[in-house]
Image (cartoon, coloured by chain):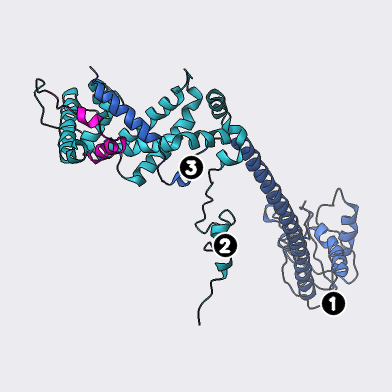
Amino acid sequence: MEHEFEKTIREKINTVEQNPLKWEKDLVWSKIDHPSSRTPVVFYYAAASIVLAGALIFFTIGLNNRKSVDLQLRAIELSIEKNKIYQAELLLANKIATEPIDCVAPTSTREEQKFVASRPVKKNTRIKSPLTPLPEKESTKELNEEIAIAKIDEPLAVINETKPIDTVRQRKGVRAIIGTGYQETALVKERKLSFKLLPYVETESIDLNTSESLTLQSKRNPH
Amino acid sequence: MSFENPYRSFGDANFFQLFPSFFNPSGNARPVLRILTTEPNYRKLQETELLRKCQHKDRKAQELLFSLHADSLYRLCCRYIKSQADSEDVMITAFNKIYQHIGGFAYSGTGSLKAWMKKIVVNESLMWLRRRHNFHLTETLDESTPEPGIEQVSKMDADDIYRFITELPTGYRTVFNLSVIEGYTHQEIGAALNITESTSRTQLYKAKSLLKKMLTQEGFHYGT
């Protein structure tokens, strides 16, 4: 049961609380969060535009950087390719200038052939090649005829090696390549090569661009 | 040789006092409540219109609501919490809650908005007190013990009554405020402070006894 004096006290307290008191009202007001209906929308638009602008700037800078890097890489690749060509040509030029080319077919394509013991041949006599004639290439015949000229009193050696004719023919091509270089090639001495009578064996074509594909035997011919 | 203050020409105020919003060395822009002077149209707003604008998160309406009720709510808060700084912190929390939940407030007549705000401030004050004060008392009183009469307190001046109440110990003061001033029952007080009803009764009994004792000491002023 509520007493009358309690009601009186309550009314008096309520009256007192209506009187303003000195306190940090502005400070409290500044620390209160003020939810606003406009703020989030504006904030989202501002944040989105900032993100878009940043992305645009980032991609523009990245694109420019990538273009310049690509150009540099392309220039480096070109220089590397030129350097490779130069090195290959230089290697070929040096080898051809110093060593006679004596190409040997791969071991797998060789056929062991046994010849009868050599016998003396007269001067300027035409002898028949003991080898089987080349069935396909006409140039081989010419080469064989050329090869068939033997020296006087020189015994025919037992031939157990084969020389691919294509390789021999391509030697001119090699010289042509040397001439196309943009550097001054070394002086290539014209050499007369002596060829031995060889059986025809199908050989693989040799890629002269790569120096590894050439099997060079350094047999110096005194002539 | 005397040093002349260059700001003397403006009287006793310096540049920052004359133009406080121009530059704030503390780094925090401090908004100043000017709504009652700068917006005369808002002063004429009815309570329902003010409530509607606050529910639509109108900044000026929020400022007006704060300006109208902050003083009385602050004094209410000071009745529970002695420290002025702590009372201001509680006011900040309370008004944050008011602005957050005002959208769900159902207006039910004149004064209902202020009553709702007072309830929020009281609840925030009680929450603050519960974190810092133990209201549990082991001693209990016999329920047959008659309550001390404080009829003479009601005859005192309002300011003296307010001062007496604020001088009570925290537990007594809180229960006395809730029971006598706010009109809560002991069951409601027990639920609010997380104490039993008998503890609430004990606290109220002791509060009234102490008030009577204080009145006796001050009785020279009122007895003559």
Question: From the viewer's perspective, is B19 left or right of A72?
Answer: left
Q: CA distance from mark 2 to mark 1?
A: 100 Å
Q: Are dots 2 and 1 in contact, CB under 8 Å?
A: no
Secondary structure under tag 2 reads helix
Residue sitting nearer the eye, A132 or A75? A75
**In the image, which residues are magenta?**
B145-169
The local secondary structure at tag 3 comes to helix
The amino acid sitting under disc 2 is Phe
| Nearer to us: label 2 or label 1 | 2
Viewer-side label of 3, 1: 3
Q: Mark 3 to mark 1: distance in Å?
A: 103 Å
Q: Position of residue A56 (x, y in %)?
A: 71, 47
- Tell me which residue sits at (70%, 56%) in the image: A106
Left or right of B60, for residue B154: left
Q: What residue would you read off at disc 1? A: A189
Q: Earlier in the sequence, mark 3 or mark 1?
A: 3
Crowd rating for badge 3 (residues with CA inside 10 Å; few <14, some 14–19, many 20+): many
Residue A149: in magenta span: no
Of all chains, the one bearing label 1 is A
Alpha-carbon distance for marks 3 and 2? Answer: 24 Å
Left or right position of B6 against A29: right
Mark 1: which amino acid? Lys
Q: Check if residue B167 falls in the magenta segment.
A: yes
The reply to whether dot 3 and dot 2 touch (C-beta < 8 Å) is no
* Mark linked to residue A29: 3
